[in-house]
Every structure is written in C-alpha cells, then in structure tokens.
Amino acid sequence: MAIVHSKALAETIKVDRVIDHIRGKKRGPTVVFFGGIHGNETAGVFALKEVFKELRSKEVMINGEVYAISGNLGALERKQRYQTEDLNRIWFQDRIERIVNHKKIQHNEESELGELFYLLHTILDTGTPPFYFMDLHTTSSDTSPFMVLNDSLLNRKYASNYPLPIILGIEEYLKGALLSYINELGYVSLGFESGQHDDDKAVQNCVEFIRYSLAVTQVVDVSEERQKQLYEAISNSSGVPHKFYEIYHQYDIAPNSDFKMAPGYANFQTIPKGADLALVDGMELKSTKKRQIFMPLYQKQGGEGFYFIRPIPIFLLWLSKKLRRFKVDHILVKLPGVEWRDASKDTLVVDQRVARFFAKSFLHLLGYRARRFDESHLIAKNRESVSKFKEYEDTVWYNK
C-alpha cells in the first residue's frame, strides 16, 4: 500500500497495487488502466479512484471486467518519477526473465516490475478477450491532452475513436516501456497524457478519458447521446487538432550532463530556426531549422530532453495500411542487403551499404520499428505480426 498525495487537488489517498477491480455479470471485454507508472504523475491514480467510486455508487452495470492498477508504489509515496531507475524503461525480455524466473532483483523498480508482471499475466490468463491496456500519464511541461501508441494498425484503428492528437513511433526512442511489452503480446495498448503534473485539469481530463474509454470498449453501455457528450468532453479538452504525428528526433541527455530546458515551451509548439532550446553543460543548444517541439523536460529526473514531431499526411497513413496488408516486406527480402534475422520472419536486417534506399521512414510504412544495430545495419521489428486482430473483429469500433 502507498500513501499518495495530489498537490493539484490537495488530497491524500491510500492505494494498493490493485486500486480497484469490478467484474460484471455480463460477458464482455477486459479493460486495464494503469496510473502512476511514474511516481510524480498522480493524476491517473486519483482519476481512477474517482471513476471507480462513481461506478460503484451508481451501481453501473459492467460488461466483462475493468481494472485500475497503480504502477510504481514506492515512487508514488515519495512523489518522485522513480526511486533507482525508470520503471517505464526496463521492460526487456532478458531482464524480465532474470527478475521473474531467476528472482535476481537488484533494486526497487525491478521488484515493482515483478509484481506488475505477475498481475498482468494473471489478468491475461483469467480475463476474457478482447483486452485493452491504457497507461495514464502527465507531462512536466504545459500540454494539451494527447495519446501515444506503438504504430500497429490495430492500435491506430482503436485510437481513431478519440478526438485527440495521436503520436506514433515513440517506441523507437523509449526503449523498455510497459506498453511496448504489452503491444508485442498483440493487444491494444496506448498511453494517455492528460496535462501537466500538478494541474487539476489533468485529473479531470483523465476522468473524462476513462469514462469515454469504458463506453468505446463497451464495458459500460451508454446511449448514443451520452457517448456523444463524452466524445465532446474529450474533444473540448484538447486545443490541438485530431491528427497523427510521428516522432523523428529525440535529444538524449548524456550521463552526468547538466541539462536545463529553456523556459516556456509547450507540447506541439512550433519554434523558429535559431531558437534557444536548452543549456547543456553551459553551452546553448539552438534549433537548426523550424521545428515542432514535443515533451520538453522540466523535471530533474529523465533521460530524454525533448523530441521533434511532424504531422503524418493522410495519404501516407493510407499507403502504409495497404503495404502492410499486402505484406510487401516478404518481397523486399529478395533484394540485396535485406534478409530475415531468423526463421520467425518478423525481423529484418538491413545492410544500408547495399540497400541505401532503406531509410527508417520507409520501414515505418511497412509496419517496422527500426533501430540502428551498428554503423551500417538496421534491425527492424515487425509491429503487425503479433497483433491479435481476431479478438477485436466483432467489436463495434473495429467495424466502423
């Protein structure tokens, strides 16, 4: 159990790992919300507490079951992002195996991971598909609410139900995230960033997001009029257009580097060429051209200083959908410099000395997450091969 304080609400509550869990009498999906994966992001925890209290007090009929789960209990109690290491950067298969199978735990976050891992797989073993996983976050800078997700067609299709800006491709930069681990199991998984850490609006935006998500997933049956009201509440919370964006640059803060973000930046803000971005070890870092900034870091903990993003043209979204469905990647391995990594045929190894046209942006169209392996090779993992489309094909949102 952890004692969690909200500066925004001037309230303190006690939460366990499972904040709440309601199983309905009718058959339905399994929806899982995470709050507080980062301990200084309490809005999701308080919002979940409020919505579940509302569900119980009004005796709302539940289809399937819904979970509210707290993330980093130790960090939540200390109101800091993490204790030893970022819990949302350690979900690697080899590390999970060491923690879970060999019980070799090196610090607090690894212990938290072990508990979350067992709970997650218990839910998958006992719950009824389709499964939905939603991770509630806030940011250190001012922001309109937005969603982040691994770029699979299944995630895209589901996220399109929300009138919010949607960020694709963050998994290429944030290695070891919980949602990436879940997405690689094949399930719908997404993150929702509701606002600035200690802003009371962030809590309310989370509440509206949870309510709307329960309606979209049909855990709660609502009238068409009520669903429209919930949709409008989400839409009104955001001052940024409902578009898909991609991340194309991350500024990594070097170990032991003194990084200080220039004041006043907000998510989605367009900045001119030559703008002061940050002070790094006493040196000014400036933009080299006009950019759109994303997730500027205004807190002490964290290894990513900021990102640059750009809107994705609708034509490219359509093209990538067609290319993925026709499995064009199976043709490309016949070209020189491109080969499968192993017999599973879900990972490409690209020798860029031979296949010079294989840029990351091209691999994105085909549904691959690309990372540099060495100076001349890319390793690209297929996002689509594991998606459990059949579990979702009878849902209302999937068939729109």
Image: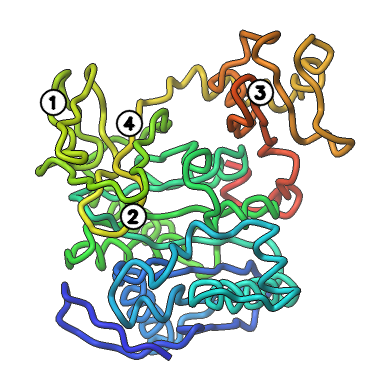
- The reply to whether the C-beta atoms of the residues labelled 4 and 3 are less than 8 Å apart is no
Q: 254 or 188: which is nearer to us?
A: 254
Residue 286, percent across and down?
18, 26
Label 2 or label 3, whichever comes before in sequence order: 2
Q: Which element carries disc 1, helix, strand or loop?
A: loop
State the residue position of label 2: 302
Count of all numbered marks drawn on residues in the image = 4
Q: Which residue is mark 3?
A: 377
- Choose mark 4 or mark 3, whichever is in front: 3
Image quadrant in which you'd find residue 239: top left
Instruction: Report the residue marked by disc 4.
Output: 308
Q: Position of residue 149 (x, y in %)?
A: 49, 46
| Mark 4 vs mark 3, CA separation in Å | 24 Å
Q: Nearer the viewer, residue 378 or 132?
A: 378
Whichever of labels 2 and 4 marks the residue nearer the N terminus, that label is: 2
Q: Amino acid at mark 2?
A: Gly
Q: Residue drawn at (69%, 26%), measured in percent from left and top?
A: 324
The earlier-in-sequence mark between 3 and 1 is: 1
Query: Mark 4 falls on what kind of element?
Result: strand
Judge whether residue 227 can be spotted in this image: yes
For badge 1, the amino acid type reads Ala
Camera-nearest label, 2 or 4: 2
Give the labeled residue for mark 1: 275
Residue visible at 40% across and 62% down?
Answer: 136
Question: Residue 204 in the image: x percent, y percent?
Answer: 25, 66
- Residue drawn at (68%, 21%), measured in percent from left and top? 323
The residues tagged by marks 3 and 1 sit, at their Cα atoms, a distance apart of 34 Å
Quadrant (top left/top right/bottom left/bottom right) for the N terminus: bottom left
Q: Is the residue marked by circle 2 packed among few (<14), some (14-19), or many (20+) residues within 10 Å? A: some
The amino acid type of the residue labelled 4 equals Phe
